[in-house]
Image (tube, rainbow, N blue to C red):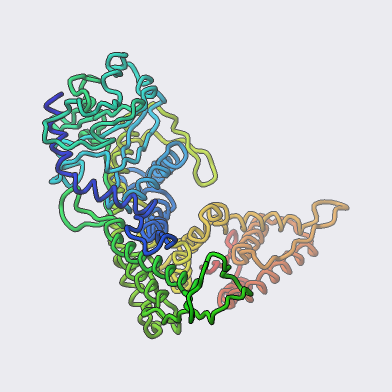
């Protein structure tokens, strides 16, 4: 264990510069950096939260990469099976992660950390003591000791997950851990931290990472090492590395019969290889935030001098404390205020200029684009519509590129989670989707799928996605090579996914329902018996008139074939009902009405063949 601790110490030394920067960015985001030298005692000491504003503004874009689709993930089977089975697997996966795990909450935390530091990490495991329930944990990269030459968990030879426990929380761990009083006494925090022999003497100690002064806190290193057979985990405390807190164990998770480490990293940008290469918004916006904080404070100082001017007079003021500097007060001696010139710069315009630079650095989806005729944030002439379109297109391409990289890492996480679901099957396979409760078929539970995040990089913008779906519906309406039902369902889903499940009715199903309903109306038009009047049937504008006309003609054909006696008045009522549907169809689709009318006319003129009756074909 001591050799492992020394290896972890060398990794910790490699990342000290990165860690110090991240601690600075955390402080800038939450509290800000104070002014070192105030010009006067009551000078402003504000903090312009540029980094925090950028993270809060751009976070919905990244969360949209998870939730913008109909499901979290699309399943494409690599073996012969029906599409319904693949969709059932996708629905079950979506239900499990959304409703039976902490996946979305952990991803929100991870995205926040990724935007600030440049990299985030997720740990995906199962809890064997709770029915193998999926457990997701967002891990701050500060608590990952990774060799700087490694680009991710997959290609690292070793890494350390630093875990922090309270003393009572550590004692509640399962019996596989050494929770004896002697072990707890040696590994808990101590104020005498100078005397602990952690690593070699040249290793620099970091509070909360390699040691702790808090006596109610315990640091545990889970040291992962790669071998030919997979990954092995060694557990120890850096403050007492000679104690084996838990026996070494292998990572139990497998995907496609290959070992899978349960850690996955996401990075905000790609510039170089290496764990500490990606930059976050803290690194990108720190100079902008410092400059804007300086502008904000100096603007407040200028306002202080303007609202509280200096005074001078022709003679010396004796006992100035006896005078009250307030409106209406008389001060003898020809008192005059000192006139000061206007500020040399326009603070508001300079703040807007710095804001636009920060938004371009952060690649916000709508960075400072002014409408045509409005002045831009750079203080120049108003931007034209063409300029706005080009800026928006350039910004969108950059955001989409980042989203594609994010979705690649997301696909790896989904593949691991589905492999874990297939591996540990002791769970309930009931799920709720599309307004009904279903059960996952056993033949769907295999890992021969390609998993891709659902949706598209630009689908985070709900209004833009709906407008895009509506434009496609209008552009391809009436095209014989395009299925209108697909476009209609897509537009309904973009408008409201839950409403689409109830409101959308497939064209074929709608026609069948209309056909069946018309058969009921025909029976209501006939006199049901002696002394029973017929029930009137109304023609409604929203009905599928073509399908209902076909139902009437089919009934007339069946009645003629069987020689069913029909009351002349009932027959007249049916024919009138047919004409009403034909007139209603003429208002909706004149071409289709003319086509059916011509077919009906030919049927009346055509010679009758025993047992055969020509029927009109409803138009598409």
The percent coordinates of residue 170 (x first, y second) are: 35, 23
Q: Is residue 13 visible?
A: yes
Q: How many marks?
A: 0
Whether residue 138 is situated above or below residue 244 in the rendered picture: below
Q: Could you tell whether 392 is left or right of 332 in the image? A: left
Q: Position of residue 398 (x, y in %)?
A: 29, 65
Relative placement, left or right, of 239 versus 327 is left
Image: 195 above or below 323: above
Instruction: Give the x, y percent position of residue 132.
Output: 38, 28
Q: Is residue 228 visible?
A: no
398 with respect to 540 (left or right):
left
Tell me the quarter of the image containing the N terminus.
top left
Work out which residue is located at the far right of the displayed protein and give it: 531
Residue 151 versus residue 465 in the image, above or below: above
Residue at the spot x=15%, y=39% of the render?
11
How far across and down, in percent of the image, does residue 129 sit? 39, 23
Judging depth in this view, the residue of 406 and 88 nearest the camera is 406
Q: Residue 445 falls in which quadrant of the image?
A: top left
Viewer-proximal residue among 255 and 274:
274
Q: Nearer the viewer, residue 349 or 324?
A: 324
Residue 516 position by quadrant: bottom right
Q: Residue at x 41, y 25 (%)?
A: 130
Residue 95 against residue 353 in the figure, above or below? above
């Amino acid at each position: 264990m001591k050799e492992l601790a020394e290896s972890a110490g060398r990794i910790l030394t490699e990342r000290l510069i990165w860690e110090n920067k991240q601690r600075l960015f955390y402080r800038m985001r939450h509290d800000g950096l104070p002014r070192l030298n105030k010009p006067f005692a009551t000078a402003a000491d504000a903090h312009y939260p540029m980094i925090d504003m950028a993270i809060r503004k751009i976070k919905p874009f990244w969360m949209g990469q998870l939730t913008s689709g109909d499901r979290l993930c699309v399943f494409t089977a690599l073996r012969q099976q029906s599409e319904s089975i693949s969709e059932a697997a996708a629905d079950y996966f979506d239900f499990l992660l959304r409703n039976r795990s902490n996946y979305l909450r952990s991803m929100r935390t991870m995205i926040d950390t990724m935007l600030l530091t440049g990299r985030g990490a997720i740990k995906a495991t199962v809890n064997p003591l709770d029915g193998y329930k999926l457990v997701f944990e967002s891990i701050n990269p500060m608590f990952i000791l990774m060799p700087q030459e490694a680009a991710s968990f997959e290609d690292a030879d070793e890494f350390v997950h630093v875990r922090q426990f309270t003393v009572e929380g550590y004692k509640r761990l399962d019996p596989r851990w050494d929770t004896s009083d002697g072990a707890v006494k040696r590994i808990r925090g101590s104020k005498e931290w100078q005397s602990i022999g952690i690593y070699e003497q040249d290793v620099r100690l970091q509070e909360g990472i390699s040691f702790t002064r808090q006596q109610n806190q315990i640091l545990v290193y889970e040291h992962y090492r790669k071998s030919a057979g997979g990954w092995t985990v060694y557990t120890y405390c850096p403050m007492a590395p000679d104690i084996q807190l838990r026996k070494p164990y292998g990572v139990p998770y497998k995907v496609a019969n290959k070992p899978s480490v349960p850690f996955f990293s996401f990075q905000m940008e790609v510039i170089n290889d290496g764990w500490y290469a990606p930059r976050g918004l803290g690194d990108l916006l720190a100079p902008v935030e410092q400059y804007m904080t300086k502008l904000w404070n100096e603007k407040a100082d200028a306002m202080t001098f303007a609202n509280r001017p200096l005074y001078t007079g022709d003679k010396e003021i004796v006992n100035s404390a006896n005078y009250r500097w307030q409106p209406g007060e008389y001060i003898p001696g020809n008192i005059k205020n000192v006139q000061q010139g206007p500020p040399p710069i326009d603070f508001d315009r300079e703040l807007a200029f710095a804001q636009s630079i920060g938004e371009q650095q952060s690649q916000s989806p709508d960075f400072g684009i002014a409408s045509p005729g409005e002045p831009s944030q750079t203080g120049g002439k108003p931007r034209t519509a063409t300029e706005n379109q080009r800026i928006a297109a350039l910004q969108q391409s950059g955001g989409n590129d980042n989203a594609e990289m994010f979705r690649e890492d997301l696909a790896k996480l989904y593949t691991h989670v589905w492999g874990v679901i297939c591996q540990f099957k002791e769970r309930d396979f009931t799920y709720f989707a599309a307004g009904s409760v279903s059960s996952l078929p056993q033949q769907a539970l295999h890992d021969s799928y390609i998993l891709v995040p659902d949706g598209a990089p630009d689908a985070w913008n709900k209004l833009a996605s709906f407008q895009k779906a509506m434009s496609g519906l209008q552009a391809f309406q009436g095209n014989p090579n395009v299925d209108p039902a697909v476009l209609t369902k897509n537009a309904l889903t973009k408008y409201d996914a839950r409403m689409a499940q109830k409101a959308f009715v497939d064209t074929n199903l709608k026609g069948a329902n209309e056909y069946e309903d018309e058969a009921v109306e025909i029976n209501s038009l006939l006199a049901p018996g002696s002394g029973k009047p017929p029930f009137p049937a109304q023609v409604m504008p929203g009905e599928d008139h073509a399908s209902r006309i076909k139902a009437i003609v089919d009934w007339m054909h069946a009645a003629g074939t069987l020689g069913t006696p029909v009351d002349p008045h009932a027959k007249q009522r049916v024919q009138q009902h047919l004409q009403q549907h034909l007139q209603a169809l003429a208002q909706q689709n004149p071409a289709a009405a003319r086509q059916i009318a011509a077919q009906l006319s030919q049927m009346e003129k055509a010679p009758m063949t025993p047992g055969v009756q020509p029927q009109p074909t409803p138009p598409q």
